[in-house]
Image (cartoon, helix red, strand yellow):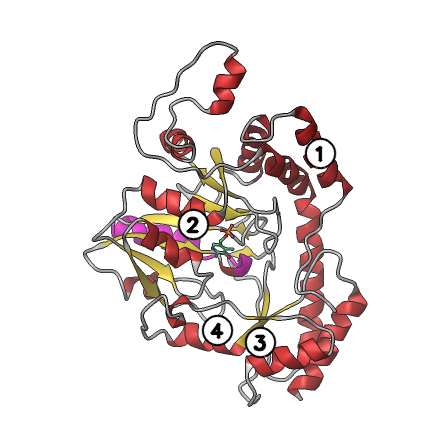
């Protein structure tokens, strides 16, 4: 069976994790601090604050901004459900905006269509690794006095106008789940350009402690912490961070290989009439975290039909990006582009170790199914 994705993990990650275990300090400590610094440095951020997942990163970002009951947060429905859930965690109302059919991302027009006097923030998603138009969304948000949070869960290694996506962002949330390109098992990061925010985020992720457990340990003396506000336990462990440091060093190679395989897909898929596939927008590059295709209009079957047929031929694909507003947890609104993309797209296998012959199989089988 050709999997849809396979994390690229090896002996180096195993050794790094074992070293942490042998050191006797496994909770948030020096490796988390090193991983935060290396990650921030690699992606053009002033500060990195590691957390337990991208979901907790998004929750913390909205909490930090003071968003709560009575506030509306504009999010794409066309995203993993955690994006919308984050607004719910702080008691705010997620308001779904539609997306651009080519990128799958929010645009100034789709956001403007749903902004109200209660809108407090926008969570823009670089969906599947395809960057949204950062300058355009920033301009709109500053004009309307809205906070802009980047959901960069999928976008590690993507670029926007020649720099890493979300470089210099006031708040960006990242994921290290194995379905993403850099994994620590579970894990996430908030990057921010604001030093005061970084300091407060560090306290908030650790129960609101004024001095972290790791710093108290390292001080060698007696140091008592204070709890100035209610925080959370959203910490990452040093075991995860050690794995993350190894993964970070491998990332450029991962991105290069994914883009090479994606180019091959583009060339081969061009032979299937009416099929459309994800590609770079004019202002940036995607890391191809999800290589999605939209089925030809002429194909009368459903995505589930295609997924089933691929499965029986040894190819494990996935449905396309979900639409949160179609799930029972969220009320129904009218988002024609989102619905079309969700209902007519699927994600094809793409992983670092994928061979060209595996890729040929995927395309051959897909072409036959759609014929
Ligand atoms: C995966 C994902 C998340 C959640 O990330 P976790 O680290 O699993 O919590 C949030 N938003 C988007 C767009 C994602 O793809």
Residue 18, numbered label: 1
What residue is at 46 percent from the left and 46 percent from the top?
173
Calculate the distance from the C-alpha at mark 4 to the C-alpha at mark 3: 13 Å
| Contact, mark 4 vs mark 3 (Cβ under 8 Å) | no
Quickly name the residue at label 3. 276
Compare marks 4 and 3 and give the one earlier in the sequence: 3
Residue in view at x 67 percent, y 31 percent:
21
Q: Which label's residue is closer to the chain start, 2 or 4?
A: 2
Check whether the beta carbons of the residues at disc 3 and disc 2 lie within 8 A of each other: no
User: Which comes before the other along the chain, label 1 or label 2?
Assistant: 1
Residue 210 spot, x, y in % from top left: 38, 23
Q: Where is residue 95 in the image (x, y as percent from the top left)?
A: 30, 62
Q: Is mark 4 on a helix, strand or loop?
A: helix
- Judged by depth in the image, the label closer to the viewer, 1 or 3, is 1
Residue 181 visible somewhere in the drawing: yes
**Residue stretch in magenta:** 128-144
Crowd class of label 4 (few under 14; some 14 to 19; many from 20; radius 10 Å)? many
Instruction: Find residue 342 and name its label.
Output: 4
Q: What element carries label 3?
A: strand
Label 1: few (<14), some (14–19) or many (≥20) C-alpha neighbours in 10 Å:
some
Picture coordinates of residue 81, whole percent (x, y): 43, 61
Which residue extends farthest top?
A: 221
């Amino acid at each position: 069976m050709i999997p849809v994705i396979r994390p690229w993990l090896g002996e180096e990650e195993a050794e790094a994790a074992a070293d942490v275990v042998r050191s006797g300090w496994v909770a948030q400590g020096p490796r988390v601090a090193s991983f935060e610094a290396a990650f921030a440095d690699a992606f053009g951020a002033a500060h990195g604050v590691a957390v337990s997942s991208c979901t907790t990163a998004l929750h913390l970002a909205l909490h930090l901004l003071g968003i709560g009951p009575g506030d509306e947060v504009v999010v794409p429905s066309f995203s993993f459900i955690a994006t919308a859930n984050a607004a719910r965690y702080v008691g705010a109302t997620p308001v779904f905006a539609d997306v651009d059919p080519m990128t799958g991302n929010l645009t100034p027009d789709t956001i403007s269509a749903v902004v109200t006097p209660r809108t407090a923030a926008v969570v823009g998603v670089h969906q599947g690794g395809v960057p949204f138009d950062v300058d355009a969304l920033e301009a709109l948000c500053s004009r309307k006095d809205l906070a802009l949070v980047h959901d960069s869960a999928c976008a590690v290694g993507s670029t926007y106008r020649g720099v890493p996506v979300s470089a210099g962002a006031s708040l960006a949330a990242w994921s290290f789940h194995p379905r993403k390109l850099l994994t620590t098992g579970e894990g996430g990061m908030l990057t921010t350009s604001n030093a005061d925010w970084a300091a407060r985020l560090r306290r908030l992720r650790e129960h609101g402690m004024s001095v972290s457990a790791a710093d108290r340990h390292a001080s060698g003396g007696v140091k008592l912490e204070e709890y100035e506000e209610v925080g959370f336990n959203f910490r990452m462990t040093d075991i995860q961070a050690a794995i993350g440091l190894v993964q970070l060093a491998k990332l450029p190679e991962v991105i290069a290989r994914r883009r090479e395989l994606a180019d091959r897909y583009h060339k081969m898929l061009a032979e299937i009439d009416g099929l459309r596939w994800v590609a770079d927008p004019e202002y940036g590059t995607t890391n191809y975290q999800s290589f999605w295709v939209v089925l030809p209009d002429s194909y009368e079957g459903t995505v589930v039909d295609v997924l089933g047929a691929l499965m029986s031929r040894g190819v494990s694909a996935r449905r396309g990006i979900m639409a949160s507003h179609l799930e029972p947890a969220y009320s129904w609104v009218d988002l024609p582009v989102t619905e079309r993309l969700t209902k007519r797209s699927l994600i094809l296998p793409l992983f670092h170790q994928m061979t060209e012959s595996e890729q040929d199989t995927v395309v051959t089988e897909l072409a036959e199914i759609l014929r």
